Amino acid sequence: MTRTGTALGAAWPEMLAVAHASGWSAALTALHAAAGPGVVVLGPAGHALVPDEVAEDADRLRQGEWEWAPDDTVEHLNTGVPGLTALRARRPVNAVQVPEARSWTTALAGLRLGLSYRLLEGALRYLDQRHTGDVVLLQHSVVKSAVADVVMEQLQVRCALEGAGPDGLDAPAVADLHAQITALDRAGVRLLGAHGYVEGGPGTAVHVSELLADAYRAGSGSTPGGFDE
Amino acid sequence: MTELDPRLARLQAQAREWAAEMRPYALEVDADPEAVTRVAHLPALARVAALQIPPEFNPEPLVLGDQTYYLMSASERVVFFEEGACADLGTMLGSPGGPMSGVVVDALGSQEQKEWFYGRLLARPTWTFFALSEPEHGSDAVNMATRLTASPDPDGPARLNGVKRYVGNAGRAEFGVVFARTGPGPLGFAATLVDASTPGFATTPVRTIGVRGAGLGEITLNDVEVAPDRVLGAHLRPSRRGMAAWLRTFNLLRPAVAVMGVGVARAAYEYVLAERRSLRVTERLRLERMERAIATTRRMLRAAAAAVDHDPSAGHLASAAKATSARLAERVTLAALDFFGPGARLEHPLLDKLVRDAGSVEYMEGTSNIQRLGVFGGLLRGAFPPLQAALLPTES
Ligand SMILES: Cc1cc2nc3c(=O)[nH]c(=O)nc-3n(C[C@H](O)[C@H](O)[C@H](O)COP(=O)(O)OP(=O)(O)OC[C@H]3O[C@@H](n4cnc5c(N)ncnc54)[C@H](O)[C@@H]3O)c2cc1C
């Protein structure tokens, strides 16, 4: 029996833990596995982002409350990230109705928060090794303050998630959380200087996290750019 | 768009025409940075490579109607490079020529050094590097570890040892400027002209998330010989060639870096305009806010360019413009995604590229925290007077 939406809504701490301990690939594998063995979950416009092996092993695609077997109409899109496959599929007429993975985006927010914690820990290690003059960068008050800002934002996201019931958060709330995670990760990655801009480094995990938020976007939340009223 | 005087408006029109020819290759260069060398014949690259050379060394400036342009002033550069950055920042950063190193050579080089440097640039499109940052010292470049050690023989070559990282065009450049320490104290610095073919010089690529065309790399310097006449500013007093002199030079560069953020932001804004024909009211308002933010930042950096053209030590406005434009590029590119449905980054590769490219502006020529220090220093020096216009009146 596959897990239903209810179970997934409560799965965010587990996703957070895997993402924090092992990074995006393991966490995405766990998240799709939580939706059911062999299941790849598609976003509202039919996109999925999965580790290569998960894409290869997929025997069911799920979008909302519909499920079907992948066929040769499934397209592979370029992500530019080694190990990450993007799929695009359209729901066929013979799709079957299943219990919806309703709280997928809440679980995904947990996953992204786990990646965010991992990012910050990496930044702390980096800053502890670097100096400005004789001062260790991590002990510089400007840097401390920037770190604290990230921590406070993470805490807000965490508190919002902890307030979610087993059904997860509603769509506008979770959309806002995803925008908030994007913004706080941008602040986090800046702490790494150009090291955070090197492919395959911590900045790539931030990039993957943003791609996930984009593909599984549920409705429009606040725009990360902050050009809303 | 901010009003421009007719002279700069003409330059802008030419830049826009050239830049448009670069845009179709943007995704190709993103996928394969070496594609830059295949588009190096486009005027946006080839012609520009032979500009940014001072009048005494450049027999072939850009002539448009009755106007002549050398792209030596920050005011010309910000107008010109906004177009390049808007068309494709990666390709622009991967262009041949001496956009950064040439400014240092102009400020510190002797007549003979300038002839050598600019002469090589004029001979054919040639890439150069500007090697300052190191793996352990980025913002903290003052404490760089790269050493230039004098030869015991006064006429013998000095030797460079160290590692430089995140250097644009590192792998494709034939020569460039390497910054090093010669000893302790504020005067113990030297900028040197280094040929990439010198024994002991090696590069490895550093792949980046965006602006891949920039071709960043790490340069290892292992006992690289530097002849006495390749040390920039050897003819100057030490106080005129040390760190303080470099910082003045960086002020001149900063507006041209700041404009990259405006160019990328404008590209994302124009992408939305082109791809989304009908907009809801809230979307239209949001797009208008984006446009206003771009226009205001552009004004800021034109003011910054005019300020450094007037006085090269007046880099505080450029610092403000650079930090503002780095954030602008991030905000506008992210906001642009929201005009398209879920999966916009997969469905709109050009927009995805702009989001990735935008991140680079934060680091080039100093992070926002470092720029904030420049702004603060300017404030204490009274450089932001409440009753004075930011934009200097143009001299005509
Ligand atoms: C696309 C690109 C092109 C580049 N091209 C070149 C090039 O051609 N040549 C070259 O030499 N370099 C180049 N660079 C490197 C660039 O100059 C450095 O990345 C930049 O100076 C920052 O250094 P860093 O990356 O080591 O960050 P770090 O100095 O390690 O900074 C880490 C964090 O600490 C903060 N910080 C550091 N010091 C302070 C302080 N005193 N106060 C407050 N906060 C501080 C920073 O803001 C940042 O958030 C390029 C970088 C990029 C991304």
Image (spheres, coloured by chain):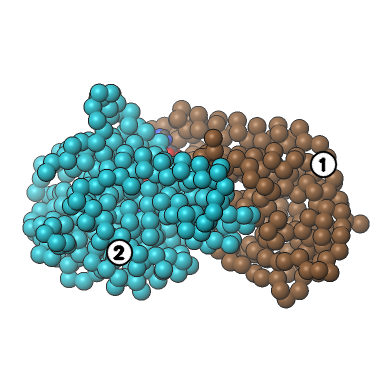
Chain colours: A brown, B cyan
Residue ID for mark 1: A167
State ligand 1's quadrant: top left
| Between marks 1 and 2 in the image, the one whose residue lies nearer the viewer | 2
Q: Residue at x 38, y 60 (%)?
A: B87
- Residue A122, position as x, y percentages in the image: 56, 44
Same chain assignment for discs 1 and 2: no
Indicate the secondary structure of the residue bearing disc 1.
loop
Judged left or right of residue B371, residue A15 is: right
Q: Is residue A203 visible?
A: no
Q: Residue at x 48, y 30 (%)?
A: A139
Query: Dividing the picture into quarters, in which one does residue B196 lie?
Result: bottom left
Q: Is residue A156 above or below residue A67?
A: above
Judged left or right of residue B85, residue B119 is: left
- Residue B116, position as x, y percentages in the image: 14, 63
Q: Amino acid at mark 1?
A: Asp
Q: Which mark is residue B17?
A: 2
Q: Which mark is residue B215?
A: none
The residue lying furthest to the right in this view is A1
Judged left or right of residue B83, residue B241 is: left
Q: Residue at x 85, y 46 (%)?
A: A7
Q: Residue at x 67, y 65 (%)?
A: A87
Other-residue count near label 1 (Cα within 10 Å), few / some / many at <14 / 14–19 / ≥20:
some
Q: Is residue B262 above or below residue A83?
A: above
Q: Is residue B46 visible?
A: yes
Other-residue count near label 2 (Cα within 10 Å), few / some / many at <14 / 14–19 / ≥20:
some
Q: Amino acid at mark 2?
A: Glu
Query: Dividing the picture into quarters, in which one does residue B62 lie?
Result: bottom left
Towards the viewer: A135 or A92 = A92
Indicate the secondary structure of the residue bearing disc 2.
helix
- Residue A125, position as x, y percentages in the image: 54, 41
